[in-house]
Image (tube, grey):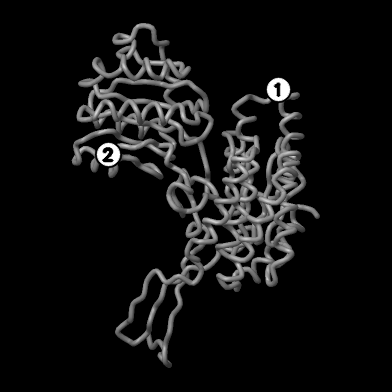
């Protein structure tokens, strides 16, 4: 099937999916989870082929980490699908109701978007995550992974198809994988206007740039994760150390890892030697501004490019700032609206930070690593929106619906 054939089939499937009741969708999700569990060894074998090819072509360790499937990650995929099955169905949910003076009742009700397409790089778990989220929200899923993960994605999709074929009421093209992994195939998907209702790109700057320059379908950008943590003058410094170390080192290759640490000048001289030593012991390379290097001379000098870099590695930019306003201004200049946080015991300062920082997820006294659909109670996310329309931050089931007006009357006609 060509890309357009897949999109046409998805549109037809979406017309049936939107009418499914919650019980049928949950049976399908349970079948999907069980099938992935049963075929765990097959999935790992298919993934091993991709990993071997990736290593042979010199792919970076960071990307190989994202590509890898193991028992733990497959168990995570299975668990996420079962969590989604247990979540409330957003389809048909009333989010507003008012009765007008003329007796009309106006309701706002959630309904599926229709066809949701995702273009993603490396992570094969996205295949199962997106399929599950789309099915529960009544949408057809069109999945276009990268060539580096082709065997893994194909194996997962085949397992899901096998599971869904055994559930009465699920259309055969509810979940489809685009086998054409060429640039031309991606461009065709970006231009499938009238068939794709939402496209989410999950990848690096080149992919995002391609989508922004070529897409004629509606998109939500899952962009860079240049995440910041600001340690305020009123911070609990032991807490700040724990949070900074976790945010940088627990999994540096993901988009919610801290890339820049901002430190109030009043605590910098006391705290920076402590936290930088702990980070250094964990292999983190520090690049600091002049004020940081005045306190810890062994630190490498940061330049302008460091403030805007998503390292996805054990590298951290550190800057001493005058005050809260300076921290907010820095984030406003260099942040990517993914996840940013503050460590402080001053509630007024925390509240001002949360209002002033324009980002999808703002954290107070906790790690940015919690910017995740699973941690937010969404099961998983279809992506992390770094824009303001129509969703922000990790996108769960509700982000795959829109709200329509349903108007109830008893014969009213408009005169004017």
Measured along the vertical axis of the image, is residue 327 above or below residue 147? above
Q: Estimate how packed mark 1 is, as few (under 14), some (14 to 19) or many (20 or more) residues with alpha carbons within 10 Å.
A: few
In the image: residue 117, left or right of residue 248: right
Can residue 121 be seen here? The reply is no
Helix or strand or loop: what does disc 2 sit on? Answer: helix
Instruction: Tell me residue 206's x, y (percent).
Output: 61, 34
Q: Which quadrant of the view contains residue 13?
A: bottom right
In the image: residue 170, left or right of residue 89: right
Can residue 78 be seen here? The reply is yes
Give the quadrant of the N terminus. bottom right
Measured along the vertical axis of the image, is residue 114 above or below residue 347? below
Q: 231 or 241, which lies in front?
A: 241
Disc nearest the viewer among 1 and 2 = 1
Give the quadrant of the C terminus. bottom left
Instruction: Tell me residue 31's x, y (percent).
Output: 66, 60
Q: 35 or 103, which lies in front?
A: 35
Q: CA distance from mark 1 to mark 2?
A: 42 Å
First in residue order: circle 1 vs circle 2: 1
Q: 265 or 51, which lies in front?
A: 51
Picture residue at 46% right of the left edge, 36% below the top: 256
Instruction: Tell me residue 77's x, y (percent).
Output: 59, 48
In the image: residue 56, left or right of residue 289: right
Measured along the vertical axis of the image, is residue 254 above or below residue 24? above
Residue at numbered disc 2? 353
Name the residue furthest right.
1
Picture residue at 47% right of the left edge, 21% below the top: 315
Picture residue at 41% right of the left edge, 39% below the top: 339
Residue at numbered disc 1? 58
Helix or strand or loop: what does disc 1 sit on? Answer: loop
Instruction: Tell me residue 126's x, y (percent).
Output: 61, 46
Q: Estimate how packed mark 2 is, as few (under 14), some (14 to 19) or many (20 or more) residues with alpha carbons within 10 Å.
A: many
């Amino acid at each position: 099937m060509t890309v357009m054939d897949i999109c046409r089939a998805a549109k037809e499937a979406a017309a049936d999916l939107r009418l499914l009741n919650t019980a049928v969708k949950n049976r399908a999700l349970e079948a999907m989870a069980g099938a992935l569990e049963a075929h765990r060894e097959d999935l790992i074998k298919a993934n091993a082929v991709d990993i071997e090819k990736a290593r042979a072509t010199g792919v970076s360790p960071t990307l190989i980490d994202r590509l890898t499937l193991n028992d733990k990650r497959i168990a995570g995929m299975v668990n996420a699908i079962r969590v989604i099955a247990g979540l409330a169905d957003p389809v048909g949910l009333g989010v507003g109701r008012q009765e007008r003076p003329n007796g009309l009742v106006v309701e706002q009700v959630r309904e599926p978007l229709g066809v949701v397409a995702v273009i993603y790089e490396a992570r094969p778990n996205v295949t199962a995550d997106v399929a599950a989220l789309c099915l529960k929200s009544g949408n057809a899923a069109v999945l276009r992974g990268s060539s580096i993960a082709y065997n893994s994605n194909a194996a997962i999709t085949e397992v899901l198809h096998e599971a869904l074929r055994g559930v009465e009421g699920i259309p055969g093209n509810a979940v489809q994988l685009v086998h054409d992994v060429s640039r031309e195939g991606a461009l065709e998907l970006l231009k499938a206007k009238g068939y794709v209702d939402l496209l989410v790109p999950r990848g690096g700057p080149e992919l995002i740039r391609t989508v922004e320059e070529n897409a004629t379908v509606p998109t939500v950008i899952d962009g860079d994760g240049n995440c910041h943590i600001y340690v305020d003058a009123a911070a609990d410094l032991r807490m700040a150390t724990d949070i900074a170390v976790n945010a940088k080192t627990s999994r540096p290759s993901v988009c919610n890892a801290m890339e820049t640490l901002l430190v109030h000048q009043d605590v910098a001289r006391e705290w920076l030697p402590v936290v930088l030593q702990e980070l250094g012991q964990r292999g983190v390379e520090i690049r600091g501004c002049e004020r940081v290097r005045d306190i810890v001379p062994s630190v490498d000098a940061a330049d302008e490019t460091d403030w805007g870099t998503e390292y996805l590695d054990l590298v951290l930019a550190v800057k001493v700032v005058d005050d809260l306003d300076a921290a907010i201004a820095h984030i406003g200049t260099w942040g990517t609206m993914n996840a940013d946080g503050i460590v402080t015991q001053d509630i007024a300062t925390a509240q001002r930070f949360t209002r002033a920082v324009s980002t999808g997820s703002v954290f107070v006294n906790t790690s940015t690593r919690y910017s995740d659909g699973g941690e937010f109670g969404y099961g998983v996310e279809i992506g992390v929106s770094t824009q303001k329309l129509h969703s922000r931050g990790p996108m769960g089931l509700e982000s795959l619906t829109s709200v329509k007006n349903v108007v109830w009357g008893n014969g009213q006609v408009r005169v004017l």
